[in-house]
Amino acid sequence: MKVYLRELELPFRHPFTISKGTKTTQPDLLVGLEWKGKWGFGEAPAISYYHTTTAGMAETLSQKKAQVESFAMTSPERFWHFLHHLFPNDPFLVCALDIAGWDLHGKLLNKSLHQIWGLDPSKIPMTDYTIGIDTPDRMVEKMIEKPWPIYKVKVGTEGDIERIVALRKHTDAVIRVDANAGWTLDEAQVKIPMLKDLGIELIEQPLAKDDWEGMKILYRTSPLPLYADESCVSESDVERCAGHFHGINIKLTKCSGLTPAKRMINHARNLGLKIMLGCMNESTIGTAAMVQLSPLVDHLDADGPLLLSVDLGTGLHYQEGKISMPEGNGLGVQLNSGLFDLN
Ligand code: MG
C-alpha cells in the first residue's frame, strides 16, 4: 500500500467566528491510500483548540509512513486498531487515515459504505447551516442569503439573545444554538429559558468542557435539550454524558474516525442519548464519510462544503438541507484533479 499526504489551506466564504475566535481559512490534511490499483481518500481539518496542526499531523505521518504502508489491508476495523496504537495521541490523523481505509475498502468491494453497513439513504437527517457570531445585521444577511430549514447559530458571547431575536424576526426555520463552552452556569440558566421562548430546538455545549458539576444542575433544570460537543471527545466520554446531557455531538475527527464513531453511536443509543453527527469544516471528502454514516443519527451538521469556497472533492449535492447520498463506491465522491498525481 502507498500513502500520500497533502497539507492545504481552504478559504472560507465568510470569515468564520465562534466563541473561541475568527478564522478566514481552514487548514486541512488530505491523505490518499493506494492499493491494488484503487485509491481511498480521507481528510482531517486542523483545529487549534484540539491542539492539532496540519504540519504536526504531516510530520507524524511521514515519520511512520513506512509502517502504515506495510499494513496488510484486510479490514478497516483492523486498520483503525493498528493506527490507534501507532498514533495514540493523534485522533485527527487517525481519522483521516481511517476514512481513507473505509473508502479504499468500499472501492475494492465495489460497494458504497452505507451499503456495506446496511443503512437506508432515505434516513439521512437534514443538515443544518451554520451562522457564525457577527453583528445581528450581518447574521440576518447571511441567513437570508442562504434559505435553509435548519440553522445552527453560534452563541457564547455578549448579545446572544439580541442576535437570536434579530434572526427570529426573519425566519420560522428550526434554530439550534452552539455556545462552544462559552457560558457560565448562571448565564446559561438565564439565557436558556429565553431561548426556549424564541423557539430554539436545542443547546450545544453550554458550559466549559470539564464543568460536570454545572452540567448536573443544568441538566435537571434546562427547559431545552443539551448536547455535549467539547465534553464528548472520544469513546470513553460517552458514558459520563448520560445524566449530564440529553445528547452528544459525535465528530469523526475528535473521536478518530468512522470505526470508533460507529461504536459511539451504539453506546449512546444504549444509554438513551440522542445523537448529532457534526463537522469541523471538512470539505466534501470528510463530509461524505459523515453522510454515509448519518442514517444512524438524529441530527446532522454537515455544512462544511457550503462554508468553504474551495473544496477537495465533488459529488455531494445539497438542496435546502437535504443531502443526496453520492453515487459510487466507498465514500462515493471524487477527488478534485491535481491534488495527487494519480499516475
Ligand atoms: Mg459544537
Image (cartoon, rainbow, N blue to C red):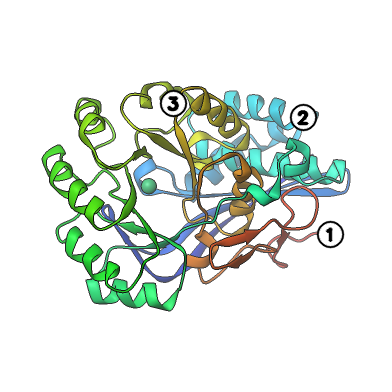
Label 2 is placed on what type of residue? Ser
- Front residue (pair 335, 297): 297
At which x and y percent is residue 317?
A: 65, 65
At which x and y percent is residue 131?
A: 36, 64
Could you tell which of marks 3 and 2 lies nearer the N-terminus? 2
> In terms of image quadrants, where is residue 18?
bottom left
Pointer 2 residue: 75
Pointer 3 residue: 238
**Label 2 residue SS:** loop
Q: Is residue 15 above or below residue 191?
A: below
Kindly report the distance in space between the C-alpha atoms of the residues bearing marks 3 and 1: 43 Å
* Residue drawn at the location 52% of the way across and 22% of the way down: 270
* In this picture, residue 40 sits left or right of residue 143: right
* Residue drawn at the location 78% of the way across and 42% of the way down: 115
Pointer 1 residue: 343
Kindly report the distance in space between the C-alpha atoms of the residues bearing marks 3 and 2: 25 Å
Say whether marks 3 and 1 touch (CB < 8 Å). Answer: no
